[in-house]
Every structure is written in C-alpha cells, then in structure tokens.
Image: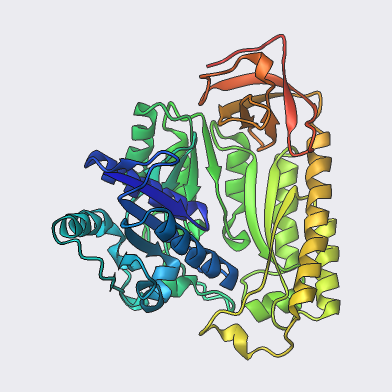
Amino acid sequence: MKAVYSTLGCKLNFAETSSLADQLSSWGIVRAVKGECADLCVVNTCAVTAMAENKCRQMIRHLVRTHPGAAVVVMGCYAQLDAERLAAMPGVSLVLGAEEKSTAADAIRQLLQRQHHTAAKEAKGRIVRSNRIESFTPSCSRGNRTRYFLKVQDGCNYFCTYCTIPFARGRSRNPDIASLVAQARQVVQEGGKEIVLTGVNIGHFGYAGNETFFDLVRALDDVEGIARYRISSIEPDLLSDALIDYCASSRAFMPHFHLPLQSGSDAVLRLMHRRYDTQLFADKVAHIKAAMPHAFIGVDVMVGMRGETPELYQASEDFISSLPVTQLHVFPYSERPGTAALRIPHIVAEEEKKHRVHRLITLSEEKRKAFYHGHIGQQARVLLEGTAKNGGLHGFTENYIRVEFPAEMQLQNKDNTLLNVTLGAFNNDETALVGIQNEEFATH
C-alpha cells in the first residue's frame, strides 16, 4: 500500500510524522512517489494561528481530490482542538487526538483493513480532553531529510494568554535521559551525523524529576558518532548561562540558538504573560555572543497582539533592531478561541498587522545578510543535504549559514557528508553563500 504524509507547523510535528511513517513502512505501507495515487493520506496539523488551521483544511481537501478513495487520517494540534469539525469534512476517515499518538499506527492499520474489506468511508472522529493527555510518544526520525529530529519533551505548562498549545498537547512531560541517549546511539548505527532536539518547551525537561535539560545536553554530547546537535528552540528564561558556556566549549553542540522573544515591549510581554522581560532577553543574547561571537541566533516575534498600540510596536521594533541577532521568524497574532488574550482591549487591524510583519521581515533580511556577509572568505564545515536550485547540493555550516555548491563540483551522492569549504559570495538570489573548494577540501 502507498501513503502520502503532509506535515504543517513545527519541527516537532515533522519528527512525529516521520516516526509514524517509519513504523507504517515496516508494515509494508510505503511512501507514494510523486504522481502515484495513495491508499492512505496522513495530515499532521498545526493550530498556532487561524491561518495555520485554514492551511490544514486546504491540505485535507487537496489530498481528498488528488487521492480519491484513499483513507484520510488527521492528527496533531488542530485535530485535538477541533476534532468534530475535521471529522465532518468530506473524505476524512479518522481523526486522532493527542493521547492517541502512541497507538496511531495500529489505528491506521485497522482502518485500512476495515476499509479494504467493507469499502466503508464513514468519517470517525476521536478525541481526548487535554487534561487527560499524559503519555509521551517517542520520536526520532529524519524522514526524507538528512538531519534527524529527536523529540525530547512534549506539552507546556506556561499558558501564555495567546496560546492554545497547552490544550492541544497537554502538560509538560518527557522521557528519561537514558532512553534519549539510546535513540541517539541508534542514529549513529543508521549513519546519521546531525540531530535536532525538538519539543514544545524543551528547557522544561525534567522539571518534575531529578534530571535537567543541562544533564541531557551533557549526556548526548558524550555519544560518539554524532557530529552535530542543534537545540531547536528554548525559552530565554530557561536558557542558563551555564548551558550557553557549555555549548560554547562542547564537542558537538553547534553555535546556533533559537529564542522566542514574541515582543520587544515589556508592556506587551506582560499582556502575553511571558516569563521574562527585555532586559533578560538582551542579557541572554549578549552572553551567547560573548561566548560564541559567530553564533547564529534566530528569534520568534509576534506582531499585532491585542494591546499592541503603535507606540508599543515601535518600542518592540527598536529593541529588536538593537539586538545582535541573525534572523527573525515573524508572524501575526491570531485570535485563538478560549484564550485569555481575547479579554485584552485594543484590537490591531489586519492591514496594520501585515504592515508590521513586512517591516520586521525587512529588518530580518538586513540582519541575515549582514551576518552572512561577515563570513565571506572564511573556512567552514558544511553538512551536505538535498539539491540546490542550480542542480548542485546545499548544506549548512556549524553556525547555520546556508551554502550552495555549483553542479560542476560533482558532489552527487554526497548527501550526509561533512565537507570543508571556503565561503564565497552570495548566490544570485542572496539566500545562501556559495561553497568553494579550498586547499583543505575533505569529506568524512
């Protein structure tokens, strides 16, 4: 049987989809190639914004049209929050809640067997309330990518006023370090060289036990054979100076951080119920840059939050502009049913949100290009992956600069190879630097 998988949202969703696909593949349900009609369509959904939910519904409708007669299974955050609506969509066969992730493969196999024998196409929605989401479903997979994604934590206890994730994924929980180290060692056996640590609030790892996220980082760093680890995203109030210093001198943790700021206005941060202020955030960025001057620092920013007046937005932009960060992930605030933010006065118009997003994206590109430009002519180590627009391969440096290689370098079949290069100038669309063979050209 053939299956197609569509993942919307975060790296954690990708990790979970990939692990599910691996399990189904071991049962003979393989990925369909482009142009094939699938027997199964799995959509792992996102609910971080209304736009994300709309994209999920669009994807479901597209798959139903493209793969007529296929079993369509919907899972993920949106499935947890609005199962009834999704189950009622034409063509949807099964909606799985968050607590059912651990048994999703079995549920899908039973569904396929039932539909094969009865040709039944009746939608069936199942849901588990958020206060009963207690299990942790392990996930470590690369899917069709080069780097692996290791799920180290799930759920969140923070309850920011704009966010529904605690309701979609439940409270914070995690496995023990020993099990995660065992998964990393399995990656080594499979030939993997880079692992991204994923979760909803990974800095909260071990909050209720005797292990900490710092303990996990040190244990993973001892796994021989993994050349690179990346921390996908960590709350600034949970990023300790000791952890920053450890990463600066560690064997395999890369000089690459992603910090959710959300707003550069202390007044808006208080409206959001964030657990830090701009001074703490600036101190963390300064500490990273002092320990690792070449570190890539990505930052999440939300614009148009209820209560974000023009003056507060300008304060936020000015603060962000002053930070020595590399790139911004900018998105507009979206009304989420049931959230405390709906009680905050002053609604920002949609056109104004778009204007603010555009301004920050422009600022982000200025910062990214300046960071890239400062590395032209330097030597770097790149992990090759995928195919670039020019027909060659691309990859990322240790500090996450995207590098493209011309086809004439003849790097075909070198995916998942570490390569020493000199960083050349920008490519034609200024999205990457061009890798140039140097005197110490080497692959491992």
Q: In this view, does 178 lie to the left or right of 397?
A: left
In what quadrant of the picture does the N terminus appear? top left
Kindly identify the residue that appears in the image at 71 percent across and 49 percent down. 287
Q: In the displayed structure, would residue 306 be above or below residue 417?
A: below
Is residue 175 shown to the viewer in this render?
no
> Which residue in the rendered view is the most extreme toward the left?
117
Residue 104 percent location from the top left of the image? 27, 58
Instruction: Classify residue 217 as left or right of residue 99.
Output: right
Residue at (66, 73) in percent of width and height: 333
Q: How many marks?
A: 0
Relative to 312, say whether 172 is above or below: above
Residue 292 lies, in percent from the top left, at 70, 39
Report which quarter residue 35 is drawn in.
Answer: top left
252 or 326, which lies in front? 326
Left or right position of 34 against 363: left
Q: Position of residue 243 (x, y in %)?
A: 57, 48
Q: Nearer the viewer, residue 376 or 100?
A: 100
Q: Quick check: can you spot residue 228?
A: yes
Q: Residue at x 70, y 41 (%)?
A: 295
Picture residue at 64% right of the left edge, 56% below the top: 259
Position of residue 86 relative to residue 113, above or below, is below
Query: Front-most of 437 and 254?
Result: 437
Q: Position of residue 228 (x, y in %)?
A: 53, 33
